[in-house]
Image (cartoon, rainbow, N blue to C red):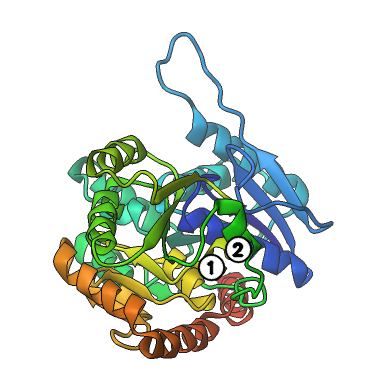
Amino acid sequence: MKIGIICHPTYGGSGAIATELGKALAAKGHTVHFFSQSLPFRLGTFSRNIFFHEVELKHYPLFECSFYSLALASKIAEVAYYEKLDVVHAHYAIPHALSAMLARQILEDKCTRSTCFKIATTLHGTDITVVGADRSMEDVVRLAINKSDGVTSVSGYLKDETVRMFNPKKEITVIPNFVDTSLFFRSPKQEIREQLGIKDEKILIHISNFRPVKCISDIIRIFNALTKRLDATLLLVGDGPERSESEILVRELGITERVRFLGKLDDIVPLLSIADLMLMPSNVESFGLAALEAMACGVPVVATNAGGFPEFIVPGLHGYLLPPGDIEGMTEKAFLLLTDDTHWLACSKACVRQAKHYETASLVEQYERYYTRLLQEG
């Protein structure tokens, strides 16, 4: 098949999954065309089956806003026509699915409905819980869902939220996020400890795009409470709007020597390989890919019982789930895992086993079958 993939290039689960999906499809012999404002952060090396199309932002003196959605539609239409794309997979309903819809309308006089590409839309969360929560955008999001040929969501939670908020006509299929366990596994190499100047203390880690929903301040307060009881270092990987306030809080608490703001990093496996615990106190997560990747590397997770976390994290087996905002409870569960070696080892092994149920190969096959079904529907 010839598949177009539209995704955000920035740090976050949707871009990671879209990129990993495209790479896996290309490795199986499909031709994949990526569309984005810039190179997706996980795309890295290329293969003969992967093509990247940068969507150039146009700015005109008459208009204050950029024309990204229109430029994206134009680029999709151009590539789809000349490369004969079978499927365009939009990761996010807004604006990507709408741009794909417009691209197909552009091609109406050049191809028939049966010969033009199919639109598959994957809902990742923000397009539903943030953009969709804005009443002024409700009908737009519903249109993007209903006019797609097929719609998937990354968790049962997100599917239920979408149905509750939009009552769409289109059936939503759950295809969860995935992890490549041939890449994400706990490496015995520990040189990264020396590079970071970390000795024998416990290591906690958090990876995200530092948006308010990630509750970075809760992570810092949990960690601060833990440092009163044990020797530890906190690694914060990523960047975003909450970073500055988080750095201020770290300074106010006097723990700057124990907290490392590492910024955006492509290769996180070495860091996960030395981590003892991942903290994910998010108010809500549509799935929680960073937690799954940590589990693949044998890192137990203390997270919230919100969103998609309960679908793959079993409390007491892979870590613990607590209500959002329960800093004291998360601190106690983190302390338990960090001080009970037998319990930690059992959780670590269980995390690795659980991650294998979300192996890339099996989930990519689900997407292949889904594309095939859309094409057969005519």
Q: How far from the left and from the top, in percent, is residue 186?
A: 59, 75
Question: Residue 125 falls in which quadrant of the image?
Answer: bottom left
Q: Amino acid at mark 1?
A: Ile
Q: Amino acid at mark 2?
A: Pro
Q: Nearer the viewer, mark 2 or mark 1?
A: 1
- What residue is pinned by disc 2? 270
| Kind of element beneath mark 1 | helix
Screen quadrant of the C terminus? bottom right
- Whether tag 2 and tag 1 are in contact, CB under 8 A, the answer is yes
Q: Residue at x 60, y 63 (%)?
A: 270
Q: Residue lying farthest top?
A: 61
Above or below for 288 versus 38: below
Q: Residue at x 27, y 55 (%)?
A: 129
Q: Is residue 142 left or right of residue 300?
A: left
Above or below for 352 versus 143: below
Q: Along the line of sight, which residue is nearer the eye, 110 or 274?
A: 274
Q: Along the line of sight, which residue is nearer the eye, 355 or 144?
A: 355
Q: How far from the left and from the top, in percent, is residue 60?
A: 51, 13
Mark 1 Cα within 10 Å, few/some/many (few <14, many 20+)?
A: many
Q: CA distance from mark 2 to mark 1?
A: 7 Å
- What residue is pinned by disc 1? 274
